[in-house]
Image (tube, helix red, strand yellow):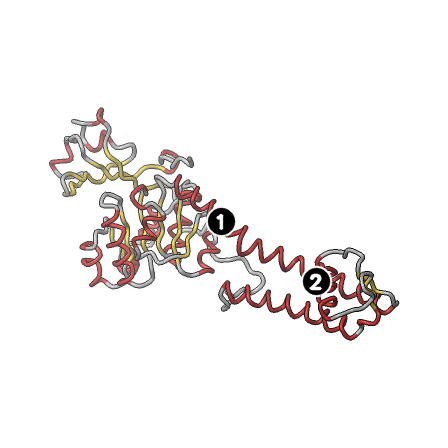
């Protein structure tokens, strides 16, 4: 069988798990930590208030303690209130100064996470979305979806033009590691498909893991993009017709295809290998479907094919190379041919 040239799974490393805390909960924890540290410093300063001197009135009130704490925790101070004992000075030097640095890191990190990064990411996403055209949308990055993306990349597709939709964070991390733009969203919603500009897409691949979800995604994509080719994976043979009715251009049943390979292998040990060779980017030959050129009109299928012509697609019907209609090609015909890998047309990367 075919050799895997690309590993889709994540490399071994530290275990990761998505935080169960929402963004606002994390923000609240940071604020609570910040206030807790300030409260600790205020308490120590109040207990040791006799170790400080207020150059204005000579007395340290509670408001003076709060003022001095906030100033010393955020800046180096103004000199109006100063520690006068060694113990107070050591506390400010060894405790307050590290807390000051820590508070600045908390404030800077919070500003970056909740303001700067979100604004920047939104700007980048908007810029990317505005340029999306001629791309492939992959809804679902499970086993079948990840294999499809890996195969597309092997065939020369630019990963930057393969947009992956999924609700699973780890799946999106794996897709992003391949260089694909990703979006964590529900692909059954119109707003999601509109956000990835499905009308401008080259094709849509749907492998949601559940047949009902895949069919619903297909319905969503089809009503928004009536002419875009859509390929859908279903695992129950009874759902092949509903998927077609939902607007799928191609319906693939992995179980049925595996059965075909198994049955074919009984007729010869190399048949299954050759079928996988035809379907794989790493094979020596490829199956290729294309519309005929103007100069090929009138020619026989065997004379027009770059390699070996197998079938003509004409008016929704298939004509085999041995049938009468294969003797003369007509304008608008599409042909399926087997060609050597080195003659296979490469997908442009831009």
Write down the quadrant of residue 64 in the picture.
Answer: bottom right
Q: Residue furthest front?
A: 57
- Point 76% across, 57% down: residue: 77
Q: Nearer the viewer, residue 4 or 224?
A: 224
**Gap between marks 1 and 2, in whole Å?**
33 Å
Looking at the image, can residue 266 be seen? no
Q: Which residue is mark 1?
A: 121
What kind of element bears circle 1? helix
Mark 1 or 2, which is nearer the eye? 2
Q: Is residue 237 left or right of residue 183?
A: left
Q: Which residue is mark 2?
A: 70
Against 328, residue 69 (above or below) is below
Against 315, residue 208 (above or below) is below
- Point 72% across, 59% down: residue: 71
Looking at the image, can residue 230 be seen? yes
- Point 81% across, 64% down: residue: 57
Q: Where's residue 43, x and y in %?
A: 73, 73
């Amino acid at each position: 069988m075919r050799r895997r040239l690309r590993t889709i799974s994540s490399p071994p490393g530290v275990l990761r798990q998505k935080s169960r805390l929402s963004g606002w909960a994390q923000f609240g924890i940071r604020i609570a930590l910040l206030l807790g540290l300030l409260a600790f410093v205020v308490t120590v300063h109040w207990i040791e208030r006799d170790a400080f001197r207020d150059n204005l009135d000579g007395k340290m009130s509670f408001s003076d303690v709060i003022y001095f704490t906030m100033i010393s925790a955020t800046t180096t101070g103004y000199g109006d209130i100063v520690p006068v004992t060694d113990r107070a000075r050591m506390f400010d030097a060894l405790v307050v100064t590290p807390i000051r640095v820590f508070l600045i890191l908390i404030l800077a990190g919070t500003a970056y996470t909740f303001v700067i990064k979100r604004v920047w990411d939104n700007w980048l996403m908007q810029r990317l979305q505005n340029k999306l055209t001629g791309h492939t949308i992959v809804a679902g990055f499970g086993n079948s979806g990840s294999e499809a993306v890996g195969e597309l990349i092997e065939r020369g597709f630019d990963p930057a033009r393969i947009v992956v939709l999924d609700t699973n964070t780890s799946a999106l991390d794996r897709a992003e590691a391949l260089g694909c733009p990703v979006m964590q969203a529900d692909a059954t919603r119109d707003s999601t498909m509109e956000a990835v500009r499905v009308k401008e897409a080259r094709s849509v691949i749907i492998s949601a893991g559940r047949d009902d979800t895949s069919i619903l995604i297909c319905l969503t994509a089809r009503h928004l993009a009536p002419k875009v080719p859509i390929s859908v994976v279903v695992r129950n043979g009874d759902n092949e017709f509903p998927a077609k009715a939902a607007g799928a251009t191609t319906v693939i049943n992995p179980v049925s295809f595996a059965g075909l390979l198994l049955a074919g292998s009984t007729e010869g040990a190399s048949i299954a290998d050759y079928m996988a060779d035809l379907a794989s980017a790493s094979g020596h030959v490829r199956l290729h479907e294309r519309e005929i050129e103007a100069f090929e009109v009138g020619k026989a299928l065997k004379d027009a094919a770059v390699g070996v012509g197998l079938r003509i697609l004409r008016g929704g019907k298939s004509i085999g190379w041995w049938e009468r209609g294969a003797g003369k090609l007509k304008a608008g015909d599409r042909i399926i041919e087997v060609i050597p890998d080195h003659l296979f047309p490469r997908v442009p990367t831009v």
